[in-house]
């Protein structure tokens, strides 16, 4: 790959799915996407229990409904951001403006830091 701005080749090159799938950040995004499905699915399916004595469902995490809601929200946001940045990875070689590439890379870093800290 020829040198270019912000880790990509020169804009306007042909799309190569094999190269895209071999990039480490793409592999990590797919793995993160799968983990977000696991987090979201496990909390939605097994995070709430029905108590026969109380008659209503409760969250298994310290009986706090906010804990389950937070887990579901984090899972959904992680799922959507993984899809967004996978689409950006596909589109990134076509971005010709260095300023737009910089915005894409900085937004990726910012979202990653935010999701790590939450």
Image (cartoon, rainbow, N blue to C red):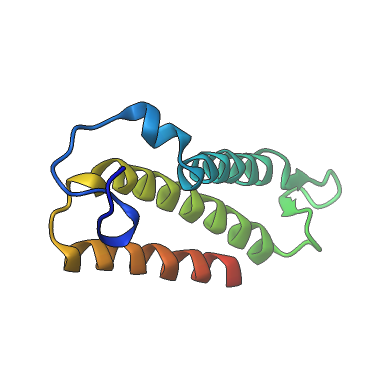
In the image, residue 61 sits, relative to residue 41, either above or below, namely: below
Marker count (numbered): 0
x 60%, y 62%: residue: 70
In the image, residue 98 sits, relative to residue 36, either above or below, namely: below
x 29%, y 29%: residue: 16
Horizontal relation, residue 102 to residue 33: left or right: left
Residue farthest toward the right in the current orientation of the protein: 53
x 79%, y 53%: residue: 60
- Residue 53, position as x, y percentages in the image: 86, 49
Position of the N terminus, as image quadrant, is top left
x 13%, y 61%: residue: 97
Q: Is residue 118 visible?
A: no
Taking depth in this image into account, of 60 and 36 the one nearest to the observer is 36
Q: Is residue 66 visible?
A: yes
Residue farthest toward the front in the current orientation of the protein: 2
- Residue 78, position as x, y percentages in the image: 50, 53
């Amino acid at each position: 790959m020829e040198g270019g701005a912000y880790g990509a080749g020169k804009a306007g090159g042909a799309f190569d799915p094999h190269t895209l799938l071999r990039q480490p950040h793409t592999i990590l995004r797919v793995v993160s996407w799968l983990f977000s499905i696991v987090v979201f699915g496990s909390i939605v399916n097994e995070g709430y229990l029905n108590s026969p004595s109380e008659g209503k469902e409760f969250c298994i995490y310290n009986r706090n409904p906010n804990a389950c809601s937070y887990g579901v929200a984090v899972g959904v946001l992680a799922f959507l951001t993984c899809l967004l940045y996978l689409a950006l990875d596909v589109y990134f070689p076509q971005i010709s403006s260095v300023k737009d590439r910089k915005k894409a890379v900085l937004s990726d870093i910012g979202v990653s830091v935010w999701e790590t800290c939450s």
